Image (cartoon, grey):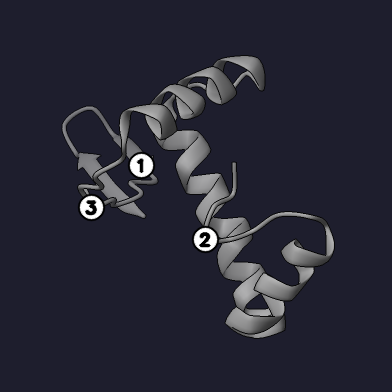
């Protein structure tokens, strides 16, 4: 939380500044197209919002089940992590 004070006007502003860092990711054209379709279809505000949510979900699954456990969950549901399409 950042606090800005203007003593002459007796005003205090508190701003919650969430710091983020830019990370570059290379995607093939087909994956990018799928990402664009998904973020529009599911009403995300941006690609970044979809990616952040997807990473949060995946990280939670990793913490709970581990990498092999996540792969098994997906494979049991018919999704191959090496070729998810």
**Which residue lies under the disc numbered 3?**
21
Whichever of callouts 1 and 3 sits on the residue coming sooner in the sequence is 1
71 or 17, which lies in front?
71
Circle 3 crowding by C-alpha within 10 Å: few under 14, some 14–19, many from 20 = few
Dot 2 lies on which element?
Answer: loop
> Where on the picture, by quarter, is residue 40?
top right
Q: Which residue is mark 2?
A: 82
The alpha-carbon separation of the residues under discs 1 and 3 comes to: 19 Å
Q: Position of residue 16 (x, y in %)?
A: 39, 46
Res. 15 mark: 1
Give 70 or 85, whichever is nearer the viewer: 85
Mark 1 secondary-structure assignment? strand
Residue appearing at x 23%, y 52% in the figure: 21
72 to 85, vertically: above or below:
below
Report the side of 5 relative to 56 (left or right): left
Identity of the residue furthest to the right in this view: 76
Looking at the rendering, which quadrant does residue 73 occupy?
bottom right
If the image is split into quadrants, where does the C terminus sit?
top right
- In this image, 50 relative to 30: left or right? right
Place residue 79 in its image quadrant: bottom right
- Residue 68: x %, y % from top left: 63, 82
Q: CA distance from mark 1 to mark 2?
A: 43 Å
Of the image marks 1 and 2, the number of the one nearer the N terminus: 1
């Amino acid at each position: 939380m950042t606090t800005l004070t203007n003593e002459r006007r007796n005003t205090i502003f508190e701003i919650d500044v969430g710091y983020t860092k830019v990370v570059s990711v290379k995607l093939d054209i087909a994956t990018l197209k799928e990402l664009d379709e998904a973020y529009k279809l599911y009403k995300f505000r941006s690609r970044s919002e979809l990616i952040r949510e997807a990473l949060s979900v995946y990280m939670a699954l990793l913490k709970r089940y581990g990498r092999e456990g996540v792969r098994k969950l997906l494979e049991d549901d018919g999704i191959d992590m090496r070729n998810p399409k």
